[in-house]
């Protein structure tokens, strides 16, 4: 291992559906400002690469998940020939499977991670959520996995017609008509592969719990919030910290049952009215894009995950964020340089350094 | 949460005025009603749900009175001694507001 560990983070695009990587980097630098962090990206236009505040020190392009698991490991090895990173913090759902399935490959390479076991990872899969919820006495919408269009329509009819069509790893589209369901089905197949999940639609307020499990059934730190603002695709664009003992108890019960190790996000819907009960929609096996918000309230979960991965003593205690604090997402424009884009596109790597400004072409004076 | 229209507050110099609440209410900075913490300025925050509300001075007075376990008659007394309002009007609006609170599951049907 390097004397000062090098950290690799994925998921750096903070577009319409923001990925968590840049928020993870920002949180890590709050506690460890000198940390060397490299970004593993799938596109040279991932916005986090061009941020002044939370860009990685270097970036490398990865092979697309569709290229297969072998290509994934080969590319990781090739990157480590150049930049021998010690810790990997994966931030995208599609990356998680190959990593949790092969802890020995990580171990033999000396890559430290903070990930769940393959068994607990499987137990929170969207298609198995109802079994988990039955064991923990938690409500969850009825969900049916389908592999063809006929099953899709049958499942929708069984669930009353008003359903969400969800991708295996990511994305959900509300679909009320057969045509909308089919369009959503083919979109999910194309993006995420089979099966596609058809889920009963539960209307209500959305609540999310972010946290870090220690692998023994305990939650080391967490923050719960109600989504205050939502994008057209349902992503939280603002959230208010809440503290509800009932929500805490459900979260504790789920994480204890899973013996979850590492970061997680629990997504709930609570139907309106005094009798509404929390309904678990899904469990994300990674940090969400809002993970830096609790870090501003002395609950730095990415830093704690890094310490857990390395076996370090926590530098700061994880505090419980106070209800009433909230975040609002603010989209701004980043300035990029064509030379960075060229480096990433042609060589697959970018080592950040200050550029001299491009001088104004001579002909501009004659215009 | 929508609150029933309150009785008109006392007016001074022709301007609507958020009347001070009757003793002992005048001194409060905040109070808890159900799961919502209400500030004297009428802003309420529910820490368990993250929702926030605003309430008229009259609604605030009623909820504070309920949190102090006052009964209907005592609340009515407090309203009429605080606001310039006919007793029958206050009684009707109070009934309406209490019914709405009960509908929201914030009080029992009778007080």
Image: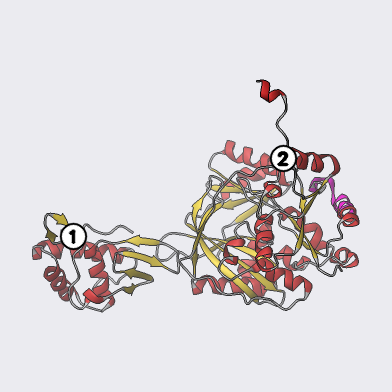
Q: Which quadrant of the structure image shows residue A292?
A: bottom right
Residue located 12% across and 68% down the image: B80
Q: Is residue A8 left or right of residue A24?
A: right
Evaluate whether residue A261 shows in this view: no
Q: Is residue A305 left or right of residue A229?
A: right
What secondary structure characterizes most of the magenta part?
helix
* Quadrant occupied by the N terminus of chain A: bottom right
Q: Give residue A176's position: percent from left, percent from top.
A: 53, 42
Q: Give residue A61's position: percent from left, percent from top.
A: 80, 47
Q: Give residue B103's position: percent from left, percent from top.
A: 31, 63
Same-chain check, marks 1 and 2: no
Which chain letter goes with mark 1? Answer: B
Separation (CA) of disc 1 from disc 2 = 60 Å
Secondary element type, mark 1: loop
**Label 1, on which residue?**
B17
Q: Nearer the viewer, residue A133 or A79?
A: A79
**Label 2, on which residue?**
A357
Q: Residues within 10 Å of mark 1 (few under 14, many from 20)?
A: few
């Amino acid at each position: 291992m390097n004397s000062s560990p090098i950290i690799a983070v994925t998921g750096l695009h903070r577009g319409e559906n923001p990925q968590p990587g840049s928020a993870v980097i920002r949180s890590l630098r709050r506690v460890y400002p000198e940390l060397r962090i490299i970004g593993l990206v799938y596109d040279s236009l991932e916005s986090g690469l061009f941020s002044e505040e939370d860009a990685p020190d270097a970036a490398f392009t990865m092979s697309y998940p569709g290229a297969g698991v072998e290509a994934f490991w080969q590319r990781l090895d090739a990157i480590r020939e150049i930049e021998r990173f010690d810790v990997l913090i994966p931030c995208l759902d599609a990356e998680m499977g190959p990593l949790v399935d092969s802890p020995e490959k990580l171990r033999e390479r000396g890559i430290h991670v903070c990930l769940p076991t393959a068994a607990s990872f499987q137990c929170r899969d969207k298609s198995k959520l109802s079994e988990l919820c039955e064991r923990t006495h938690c409500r969850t919408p009825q969900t049916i996995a389908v592999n063809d269009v006929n099953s899709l329509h049958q499942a929708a009819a069984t669930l009353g017609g008003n359903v969400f069509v969800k991708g295996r790893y990511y994305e959900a589209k509300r679909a009320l008509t057969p045509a909308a369901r089919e369009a959503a089905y083919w979109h999910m197949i194309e993006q995420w592969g089979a099966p596609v999940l058809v889920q009963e639609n539960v209307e209500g307020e959305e609540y999310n719990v972010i946290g870090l499990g220690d692998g023994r059934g305990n939650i080391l730190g967490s923050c719960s919030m109600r989504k205050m603002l939502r994008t057209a695709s349902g992503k939280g664009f603002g959230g208010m910290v809440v503290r509800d003992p009932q929500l805490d108890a459900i979260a504790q019960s789920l994480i204890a049952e899973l013996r979850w190790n590492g970061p997680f996000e629990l997504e709930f819907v609570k139907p309106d009215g005094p009798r509404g009960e929390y309904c678990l929609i899904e469990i994300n096996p990674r940090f969400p894009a809002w993970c830096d918000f609790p870090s501003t309230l002395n609950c730095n979960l990415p830093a704690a995950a890094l310490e857990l991965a390395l076996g370090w003593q926590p530098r700061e205690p994880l505090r419980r964020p106070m209800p009433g604090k909230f975040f609002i997402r603010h989209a701004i424009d980043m300035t990029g340089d064509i030379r960075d884009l060229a480096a990433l596109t042609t060589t697959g790597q970018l080592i950040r350094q200050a550029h001299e400004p491009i001088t104004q072409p001579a002909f501009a004076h004659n215009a | 949460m929508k609150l029933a229209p309150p009785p008109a507050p006392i007016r001074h110099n022709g301007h609507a005025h958020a009347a001070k609440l009757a003793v002992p209410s005048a001194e409060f900075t905040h109070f808890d009603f159900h799961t919502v913490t209400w500030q004297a300025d009428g802003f309420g925050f529910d820490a368990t749900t993250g929702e926030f509300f605003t309430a008229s001075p009259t609604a605030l007075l009623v909820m504070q009175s309920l949190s102090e376990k006052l009964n209907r008659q005592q609340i009515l007394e407090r309203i009429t001694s605080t606001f310039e309002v006919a007793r029958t009007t206050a009684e009707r609006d109070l009934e309406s507001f209490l019914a709405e609170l009960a509908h929201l599951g914030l009080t029992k049907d009778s007080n």
